[in-house]
Amino acid sequence: MGITRADARMLLEAGVRRPFEGDLLEFGRMTVYLTPTELDRWAGEEGYRLHPAEISLSLQAPAAAAGCLDDTAFFGRLGFDRVDSLDVDDYEGASFLQDLNQPLPERLHGQYDVVYESGTIQHVFDMPQVFRSIHAALKPGGRMIHG
């Protein structure tokens, strides 16, 4: 799962219309396929004001070798204060372990301004439960973004 260059452009466009802030929950840890320089250039082209954030490279060796950002740096630059991740297992260091076929734990209800997913829910059998969990995780007025 990852954030392609097209996904990054889509997120920048969405952020111009309604700026990102607050807390984000990503389903899975995203591999980001763009460098800090590309993000800076594209943000300038879109008129998006990036936020200061510590730059760290991808946890995936090939993406890091290409100079690509990691997911927390990417979302931090977009304006999020907190970036959490949720996955069925811990192989990528998710913040929370959760089978999305099951209800979301109450401690995660109403915690996020944005839930972002890019290829995770296609692996879930109980689609109505996934969307109930997304709705539960969002704060009032929050938004779900599919990459």
Image: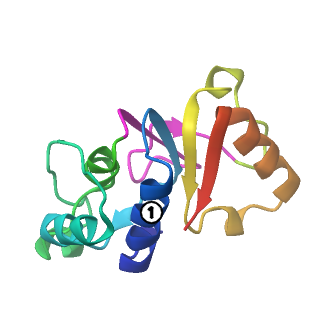
Secondary structure, magenta segment, majority class? loop
Q: Quadrant of the C terminus?
A: bottom right
Tell whether 89 sits left or right of 32: right
> What residue sits right under mark 1 in the picture?
11
Front residue of this view, candidates 101 and 17: 17
Residue under the point 77% across and 50% down? 130
Residue 17 visible (yes or no): yes
Q: Position of residue 98 (x, y in %)?
A: 63, 41
Indicate whether 112 appears above or below 60.
above
Amino acid type at image mark 1: Leu
Asked if residue 91 lies in the magenta stretch, the reply is yes
Q: How many marks?
A: 1
Residue 29 visible (yes or no): no
Residue under the point 52% across and 36% down? 96
Q: Position of residue 40 (x, y in %)?
A: 18, 64
Asked if residue 116 lies in the magenta stretch, the reply is no
Q: Residue furthest top?
A: 107
Task: Give the magenta range.
Answer: 80-99
Q: Which corner quadrant of the image does residue 141 belong to?
A: top right
Q: Which corner quadrant of the image does residue 33 belong to?
A: bottom left
Residue under the point 42% across and 57% down? 16
Front residue of this view, candidates 61 and 80: 80
